[in-house]
Amino acid sequence: EIVMTQSPATLSVSPGERATLSCRASQSVSNNLAWYQQKPGQAPRLLIYGASTVATGIPARFSGSGSGTEFTLTISTLQSEDFAVYYCQQYLYWPLTFGGGTKVEIK
Amino acid sequence: EVQLVQSGAEVKKPGESLKISCKSSGYSFSSYWIGWVRQMPGKGLEWMGIIFPSDSDTRYSPSFQGQVTISADKSIGTASLQWSSLKASDTAIYYCARGASGYYTWWDYWGQGTLVTVSS
């Protein structure tokens, strides 16, 4: 099973600042990596797929990069609605696996 | 508009059986994989398994193999997740999601979640 490790577990950021979240795979998943956002009491929402393709309707301040085993989600200018938990997920191998999540909180 | 609408919250006792559902609309149900994801209280997301409604091809994550049954009824556009004997540790929110392209894929639409509480 591919283990996805996200860091940090919690990221404290002020509104308007940049947030950088990391995700590491235990072996190469090429670019078969997605990012999701989950707010309290809500279902996950797809943000990024193919490691860097922004999903439909997602603001341009979200971007993804990386390939192989190292990936990054960047939120360029944090808005109040961006404070949430973010999960990465690999989809190259079965079983599909998520990272443990990074909580982005207000500093 | 693509929608996945899940059945309502359930409160059950240990040992009871349960089936929850995920009704699709706005797309061809038979043509896309549906997956189920568990979220235990205060925890992260875990893949349970997936099904292709067209032929009911089903895959289970090793941790959930033999613990649950995933099914689909393409005549009513609904996927289901069921337990034959619930345990307290099954208490969680369960989400269904649609695979965007095959099952080695990202998951683009999600249901609102079904809270299952198992308590004596």
Image (cartoon, rainbow, N blue to C red):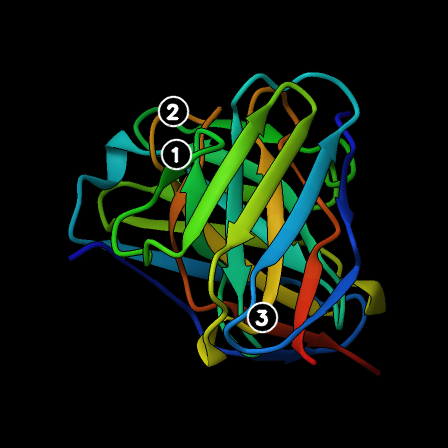
| Residue wearing tag 2 | B102
Whether residue A99 sits left or right of residue B114 in the image: it is right
> In this orientation, which residue lies closer to the viewer: A75 or A1?
A75
Which label lies toward us, 3 or 1? Answer: 3
Q: Quadrant of residue A93?
A: top right
User: How many numbered tags mark residues here?
Assistant: 3
On-image quarter of the N terminus of chain A:
top right
Q: For mark 3, give the secondary structure.
A: loop
Label 1 with label 2: CB-CB less than 8 Å = yes
Q: Eyeballing the image, is A58 above or below B119?
A: above
Q: Quadrant of residue B110?
A: bottom left
Query: How far apart are the alpha carbons under marks 3 and 1?
Result: 27 Å
Query: What numbered label is drawn on residue B33?
Result: 1
Which label lies toward us, 1 or 2? Answer: 2
Which label lies toward us, 3 or 2? Answer: 3
Q: Residue at x 56, y 61 (%)?
A: A18
Q: Residues within 10 Å of mark 2 (few under 14, many from 20)?
A: some
Q: Quadrant of residue B12?
A: bottom right
